[in-house]
Image (cartoon, rainbow, N blue to C red):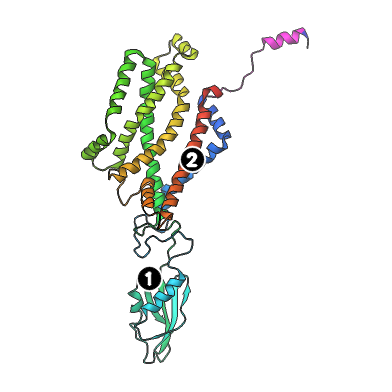
Amino acid sequence: MTTRDLDTALDAPPVSGPQRSLWSDAWIRLRRNRAAVASGILLIVLGIASIVGPTLTPHAYDTVYPQYVRVPASLEPYPRAERIVPAFERALARARVVVGEVEVDGETVRAPVSAEGGLDPRLPRYLDRSDLFGAARLVDVAPDGTSGVLEADVQRLRFLFGTDANGRDLFSRTLVAVRISLAIGLLASLVALVIGVTYGAVAGYAGGRVDAVMMRFVDVLYALPFIFFVILLVVFFGRNFVLIFLAVGAIEWLDMARIVRGQTLSLKRQEFVQAAEALGVEASGILRRHIVPNTLGPVVVYLTLLVPKVILLESFLSFLGLGVQEPLTSLGVLISEGAANMQGAPWMLVFPAATLIAILFALNFLGDGLRDALDPKDR
C-alpha cells in the first residue's frame, strides 16, 4: 500500500452498520437462549390452551357426574365394558325374559331376548331406569313376538386426568385453573411492575429528603397487615377477584420499589448519567432512557419470581374464602383438594402439581434468559 492510499484510508469516514437499540439487541440475544425460548413457547401454549381448551373439551368444568366420582385417569372410556354387561343383565333381572350374550359396540349395547309368552313392549323401560342406559328399543322382533334384540345407548365418557371428589372432569378444571392462575399472577405482577419501577426510580434518582419521605411511606405500608387490607376491599367491593388481586399487586410493589431504588442509587453515579445531566437532559428523560432500561435485568428476574408467589398467595386467600369461589378454580385450589385426597385419588394432586411445576420452571428459565438479554454489561 502506498503513502497516498494510506492517507485516503485514514481520511475516509468510518464504516458502521445500523445501530441497534437495547430492545432489538436484547431480542437477538434472547433468541439464542434455547431454554428461555422453549420456556416462552411452553407458557404461550399453556396460555392458549387455557383460553381455547375449555370450550373444546367434551366436559364443562362445572358439570358433575355423580356416577364417576374420583375415577382414575384413563385413555379408555367410562364405563368399562366389564361394568356395562353386568349392569345390563341386572336391569333385566326382573323382566322375565331370557337374555342372550350381551355385546358392546362403541356406545351401543345389544342382546337377544326371548319370552315364551311373547315380549312385553314395555321391556325397554327396564333399561331406561338405569343411569347408564338410554333410548332403549326393541328391534328385529320375530313375527310371533317371542324373540328379538334389545338395544340401548350407553354414554361412554373419557376423563384424561380423571375426576375430582365431586365427579367433575379434572382436565377441564385444570385448563380453567391455569387460565385463572396465570391471569391473577400476570395482573398482580404488572401492577407491581408499573408502580414499583416508577416509585423506586423516582425515589432513588431524587435522593435526599424526597427519597427519605418516599421510603418511609413504604415502611408504613410494610407494617399494615395484608389480610386486613384484603378484607376491607371485600367489604367495600364484594368478592371480585380482579379487584382483590389488583390489591395484591398494589402491596407486592413494595419489594419491587426497593430493588429499583437500590439499582438507581448506583446508576445515577455512572458517567453516562452524569453526561446526560451535563447536556441538560430532563430528569424524566434520564429516568426513561438511562435509569429504567438499565434496571430491567433484576426487575425481570424478580417479576418471574413474583408470578408464582402471587399464585401461591391466591391459594391461601381462596382457602380463607376470599379468593376464587366455586365453581371456578385455580391451581392452588386444585392442589389443596388433591392433597386432601392424596391417598385414595393421587391423580387429583399429580396433574395440577405437575402443571404448576412446569409453569414455575418455565418462568425461571425465561427470567434467566431475559436477565442475560437485558443486562447492559453483556452488550
Q: How many marks?
A: 2
Choose top left, top right, bottom left or bottom right for residue 280: top left
Q: Where, quadrant-wise, is the C terminus in this rendering?
A: top right
| Disc 2 versus disc 1: nearer the observer | 2
- Whether 313 is among the magenta residues is no
In magenta, the rendered stretch is 3-21
Q: Position of residue 308 (x, y in %)?
A: 41, 39
Q: Residue at x 41, y 72 (%)?
A: 153
> At which x and y percent is residue 261?
39, 21
Rendering quarter of residue 263: top left
Q: Position of residue 206 (x, y in %)?
A: 36, 15
How much space separates mark 2 and mark 1, taking CA atoms? 43 Å
Q: Is residue 101 above or below residue 231?
A: below
Task: Name the residue tied to disc 1.
Answer: 132
User: Which residue lies most toward the left here?
Assistant: 235
Is residue 313 depicted above or below 136 in this figure?
above
Name the secondary structure under disc 1.
loop
Q: Is residue 11 a member of the stretch shown in magenta? A: yes
**Residue density around tag 2, few if under 14, some if 14–19, many if 20 or more, within 10 Å:** few
* Type of amino acid at the residue the image marks with label 1: Leu
User: What residue is shown with label 2?
Assistant: 361
Q: Is residue 157 above or below residue 330?
A: below
The residue under label 2 is which amino acid type? Phe
Compare residues 132 and 279 and report the one nearer the observer.
Answer: 132
Query: Is residue 216 visible in this depiction of the protein?
Result: yes
Q: Which quadrant of the figure contains the N terminus?
A: top right
Residue 55 is at least partly visible in this image = no
